[in-house]
Image (cartoon, rainbow, N blue to C red):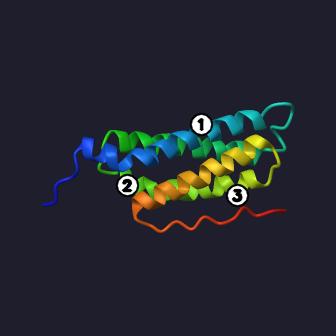
Amino acid sequence: MTTRPTAKENAKRFASVIQALQACEAACTHCATECGKNGHAEARARCISVCTDCAEYCALTRKFLERNSEFAELLLEDCAEICSQCAEECDHHGQGHCSACATACRACMDACLKVAGVEAVTAEPTVF
Protein backbone atom coordinates (compact mmCIF):
# COMPACT_ATOMS: atom_id res chain seq x y z
CA MET A 1 0.00 0.00 0.00
CA THR A 2 1.34 3.39 -1.01
CA THR A 3 1.12 6.21 1.49
CA ARG A 4 -0.22 9.52 0.33
CA PRO A 5 1.86 12.66 0.74
CA THR A 6 0.99 14.78 3.75
CA ALA A 7 -0.88 18.06 3.40
CA LYS A 8 2.39 19.90 4.07
CA GLU A 9 4.20 17.97 1.34
CA ASN A 10 1.37 18.63 -1.08
CA ALA A 11 1.30 22.33 -0.18
CA LYS A 12 4.84 22.65 -1.55
CA ARG A 13 4.12 20.45 -4.56
CA PHE A 14 0.93 22.27 -5.46
CA ALA A 15 1.91 25.87 -4.56
CA SER A 16 2.39 27.08 -8.14
CA VAL A 17 -0.75 25.42 -9.48
CA ILE A 18 -2.82 26.76 -6.58
CA GLN A 19 -1.53 30.24 -7.37
CA ALA A 20 -2.41 29.78 -11.07
CA LEU A 21 -5.87 28.49 -10.15
CA GLN A 22 -6.49 31.54 -7.95
CA ALA A 23 -5.33 33.92 -10.67
CA CYS A 24 -7.46 32.19 -13.29
CA GLU A 25 -10.51 32.17 -11.04
CA ALA A 26 -10.14 35.91 -10.43
CA ALA A 27 -9.54 36.73 -14.12
CA CYS A 28 -12.52 34.64 -15.24
CA THR A 29 -14.83 36.17 -12.63
CA HIS A 30 -13.74 39.66 -13.66
CA CYS A 31 -14.14 38.86 -17.36
CA ALA A 32 -17.64 37.44 -16.88
CA THR A 33 -18.65 40.52 -14.88
CA GLU A 34 -17.24 42.95 -17.44
CA CYS A 35 -18.78 41.10 -20.39
CA GLY A 36 -22.18 41.47 -18.75
CA LYS A 37 -21.91 45.25 -18.49
CA ASN A 38 -23.11 47.95 -20.87
CA GLY A 39 -25.69 45.83 -22.65
CA HIS A 40 -23.17 43.26 -23.92
CA ALA A 41 -24.58 40.29 -21.98
CA GLU A 42 -26.54 38.85 -24.89
CA ALA A 43 -23.71 39.22 -27.41
CA ARG A 44 -21.19 37.71 -25.00
CA ALA A 45 -23.42 35.10 -23.37
CA ARG A 46 -21.07 32.23 -24.22
CA CYS A 47 -18.06 34.11 -22.86
CA ILE A 48 -19.92 34.85 -19.63
CA SER A 49 -21.00 31.22 -19.30
CA VAL A 50 -17.60 29.70 -20.06
CA CYS A 51 -15.77 32.17 -17.80
CA THR A 52 -18.19 31.44 -14.96
CA ASP A 53 -17.74 27.69 -15.40
CA CYS A 54 -13.97 28.05 -15.58
CA ALA A 55 -13.84 30.20 -12.44
CA GLU A 56 -15.97 27.72 -10.51
CA TYR A 57 -13.97 24.70 -11.69
CA CYS A 58 -10.70 26.43 -10.80
CA ALA A 59 -12.09 27.15 -7.32
CA LEU A 60 -13.18 23.53 -6.90
CA THR A 61 -9.83 22.17 -8.07
CA ARG A 62 -7.96 24.57 -5.77
CA LYS A 63 -10.08 23.55 -2.78
CA PHE A 64 -9.44 19.86 -3.44
CA LEU A 65 -5.70 20.49 -3.67
CA GLU A 66 -5.63 22.66 -0.55
CA ARG A 67 -7.38 20.08 1.59
CA ASN A 68 -5.23 17.24 0.26
CA SER A 69 -8.16 15.35 -1.24
CA GLU A 70 -7.31 11.96 -2.67
CA PHE A 71 -9.33 13.00 -5.74
CA ALA A 72 -7.58 16.33 -6.38
CA GLU A 73 -5.34 15.12 -9.15
CA LEU A 74 -8.32 13.72 -11.05
CA LEU A 75 -9.61 17.26 -11.53
CA LEU A 76 -6.42 18.72 -13.01
CA GLU A 77 -6.75 17.52 -16.60
CA ASP A 78 -10.41 18.49 -16.76
CA CYS A 79 -9.58 21.90 -15.34
CA ALA A 80 -6.88 22.31 -18.00
CA GLU A 81 -9.40 21.50 -20.74
CA ILE A 82 -11.93 23.99 -19.38
CA CYS A 83 -9.20 26.64 -19.15
CA SER A 84 -8.20 25.94 -22.74
CA GLN A 85 -11.76 26.37 -23.98
CA CYS A 86 -12.23 29.52 -21.93
CA ALA A 87 -9.04 31.00 -23.41
CA GLU A 88 -10.28 30.20 -26.92
CA GLU A 89 -13.63 31.88 -26.23
CA CYS A 90 -11.98 34.98 -24.78
CA ASP A 91 -9.72 35.21 -27.84
CA HIS A 92 -12.83 36.05 -29.88
CA HIS A 93 -13.25 39.36 -28.06
CA GLY A 94 -10.92 42.33 -28.27
CA GLN A 95 -11.49 43.60 -24.76
CA GLY A 96 -8.54 43.92 -22.39
CA HIS A 97 -10.24 41.86 -19.70
CA CYS A 98 -10.82 39.07 -22.23
CA SER A 99 -7.14 39.09 -23.21
CA ALA A 100 -6.10 39.03 -19.56
CA CYS A 101 -8.50 36.15 -18.92
CA ALA A 102 -7.15 34.15 -21.87
CA THR A 103 -3.59 34.64 -20.61
CA ALA A 104 -4.52 33.53 -17.08
CA CYS A 105 -6.39 30.52 -18.46
CA ARG A 106 -3.41 29.39 -20.53
CA ALA A 107 -1.05 29.75 -17.56
CA CYS A 108 -3.46 27.77 -15.40
CA MET A 109 -3.85 25.10 -18.07
CA ASP A 110 -0.06 24.69 -18.26
CA ALA A 111 0.25 24.54 -14.45
CA CYS A 112 -2.52 21.94 -14.16
CA LEU A 113 -1.04 19.74 -16.86
CA LYS A 114 2.43 19.99 -15.35
CA VAL A 115 1.21 18.78 -11.95
CA ALA A 116 -0.91 16.10 -13.63
CA GLY A 117 2.21 14.88 -15.44
CA VAL A 118 0.91 15.73 -18.89
CA GLU A 119 3.06 17.76 -21.23
CA ALA A 120 1.40 21.10 -21.86
CA VAL A 121 1.19 22.43 -25.37
CA THR A 122 0.02 26.01 -25.21
CA ALA A 123 -1.30 26.94 -28.60
CA GLU A 124 -1.07 30.47 -29.86
CA PRO A 125 -4.40 32.24 -29.77
CA THR A 126 -6.51 31.96 -32.89
CA VAL A 127 -6.88 35.33 -34.58
CA PHE A 128 -10.07 35.97 -36.49
Task: Say which amino acid is labelled 1.
Answer: Ala
Task: In this rendered view, identify the residue nearer to me: 99 or 32.
Answer: 99
Task: Say which amino acid is labelled 3.
Answer: Glu
Residue at 54% of width from left, 56% of height from top?
A: 109
Q: CA distance from mark 2 to mark 1?
A: 21 Å
Q: Residues within 10 Å of mark 3 (few under 14, many from 20)?
A: many
Task: Say which amino acid is labelled 2.
Answer: Glu
Q: Are marks 2 and 1 in contact (CB under 8 Å)?
A: no
Task: Give the labeled residue for mark 1.
Answer: 26
Q: Position of residue 60 (x, y in %)?
A: 46, 42
Number of on-image labels: 3
The disc label shown at residue 88, or none: 3
Q: CA distance from mark 3 to mark 1?
A: 17 Å
* Quadrant position of the N terminus in the picture: bottom left
Q: Secondary structure at mark 3?
A: helix
Q: Are marks 3 and 1 in contact (CB under 8 Å)?
A: no
Judge depth for marks 2 and 1 and give the one in front: 1
Q: Is residue 89 left or right of residue 39?
A: left
Q: Are marks 3 and 2 in contact (CB under 8 Å)?
A: no
Q: CA distance from mark 3 to mark 2?
A: 24 Å
Q: Is residue 101 left or right of residue 37?
A: left
Q: Is residue 88 left or right of residue 40?
A: left
Residue at 51% of width from left, 46% of height from top?
A: 20
Task: In this rendered view, identify the residue nearer to me: 53 or 59.
Answer: 59
Pointer 3 or 2: first along the chain:
2
Q: Secondary structure at mark 1?
A: helix
Task: Give the labeled residue for mark 2.
Answer: 73
Q: Secondary structure at mark 2?
A: helix
Q: Is residue 18 left or right of residue 121?
A: left
The disc label shown at residue 103, or none: none
Q: Position of residue 59 (x, y in %)?
A: 49, 40
Residue at 51% of width from left, 44% of height from top?
A: 21
